[in-house]
Structure formats: structure tokens, C-alpha cells
Image: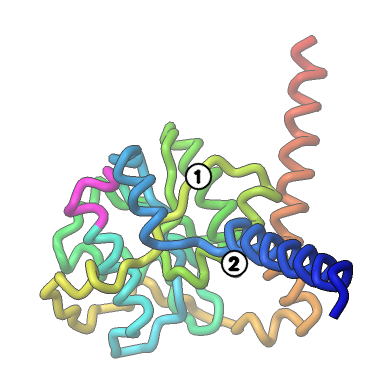
Amino acid sequence: MSKKFIIIIGVVTLLTFSSCEAYYHLFYTNPSICFKEASLKKPYDVIIVPGFPNDSGKVNMILAERVKWAYYLYKNGYTKNIIFSGSAVHTPYIEAKVMRLLALQIGIKDEHIFMETKAEHTTENLYYSCVLAQNLGFNSIAFATEPAQASFMKPFKRKFKLKLDFLPVLTDSLLTLKIQLKPIDESSAFVLNFVPLNQREGVIKSLRGTRGHRVKKEIRKAKKINRQKTHLNK
């Protein structure tokens, strides 16, 4: 093997490793690193907790985990307030309202709970809740969910130019909570004449929603309104 060939192999390996490292830091949300950074910034004015379809008469495990994580952050001084986000998407229950009822059950005060009930995709959870937080006068915002979902949202934070941090679930910390959520009276979250998302949207439209298509339209609409206001004020 020639010296020149060895050098080429070394350069290619270094570039590949560097690219992987860059990709990792760009798209992956490391829970431990996030928490170290968040500890320096806490308390946040508000955290955003995305919803998940509710199982009637049961306590959904993913919903329960997200509510418990919100409680952990609230109890330990990482946030002053919570926005639960989610419409009735795949089941006839408004996800934000279900999470609020579960949160009240475990001791989060109602005056510290806010609901965003329009979002049908995670990109919308992120965007609509940020808009709500800003309208409520909250400045420091964090998105609290599982590491995989937080990582998926990382590019959209940059794309939509949202000012927020991520507080992904730390499993070890969550396990310290000795909380058993009980089934709730979910009637106040029930939507009559409900049609699930997969019957309202085809696969392509749903995928576009997941990729933030509706958010893009909302941003363009907001910019147009701001331009009109600016023009009228001149």
C-alpha cells in the first residue's frame, strides 16, 4: 500500500467522522447536555408539552409519561407554567384538555396551565404553542418531550426561527416520581361528530403537515398581516 493511498484513506476517514459528528450535533438532542444547559437558564417562563391520542377509559402510557415529565419540571423549578398542546386528531378527545385533567390530578395548579387546541402535527405543536406563549408574554420557552421527538423538531426550530430550548425526558429522573395516574372523566374533552385525521387528510397531505406545510402557511399569513398593519400605520 502506497504512502499516498494511506494519506487519502486517512483524509476520507477524517472527513466522514467529522461529517457524522456535525450531523449528530445538528440533529440529535442529547438529554444530558440539554439539562446541563437548562439548569443555567431555569426557570423557564413556560414549557410546551405536545399531545398524544387519548385511549378512552384508560391512561395512555405516552400521555402519562409526558404529563409526569411536565410535573417533574414544574416541581423542580425548571418551569413556572405549562402549555399542553394538541387537538382531537386520531381519537375524539382534545389532547391538550386530557393532559390538563391528568396534570390537575397530580398537583399542577390550574393557573399555571395553558392549552393550545389547534395542532394536529408535532410541527404545529411547536409553532402554535410558541405563538401562544409569546401572546401570553412568556419570553423563555422550552419544548418538553421524548428525546426522539425533540430531535425530530430540532431542524424545525431553526427553519421557523423559533426561540426555545429543548428539555427531553430523562428516564432516570422520571423514575424517581412515585406517581400513579388514574383514569379521568374525559367527557369535557370529547368532540361530537369527530372525524379522525386519516379520514380528513390523505397520506401526502398528512406528510406535508408533518413537514410543517400548515405552519409555513401560517407564517406567510402572519407576515402579510404585519405588512398590512405597517402600511396602515404609515
Density class for disc 2 (Cα within 10 Å; few <14, some 14-19, many ≥20) is: some
Q: Quadrant of the N terminus?
A: bottom right
Density class for disc 1 (Cα within 10 Å; few <14, some 14-19, many ≥20) is: some
205 with respect to 158 (left or right): right
Residue at (33, 84) in percent of width and height: 61
Q: Against 100, is 59 above or below?
A: below
Residue 80 at x, y = what percent? 27, 43
Q: Which residue is mark 2?
A: 152
Q: Which residue is mark 1?
A: 164
Q: How many marks?
A: 2
107 with respect to 28 (left or right): left
Residue 86 at x, y = what percent? 49, 66
Query: What predominant SS class does the magenta segment belong to?
Result: loop
The residues colored magenta run: 73-80
Residue at (51, 51) in percent of width and height: 129
For residue 57, say whether it is visible: yes
Question: Please, which residue is most extreme toward the left here?
Answer: 178
Q: Residue 58 occupies which quadrant of the picture?
A: bottom left
Q: Quadrant of the C terminus?
A: top right
Residue 149 at x, y = what percent? 52, 69
Which amino acid lies under the numbered mark 2 shown in the image of this protein? Phe
Question: Please, which residue is most extreme toward the front here?
Answer: 2
Q: Which mark is residue 40?
A: none
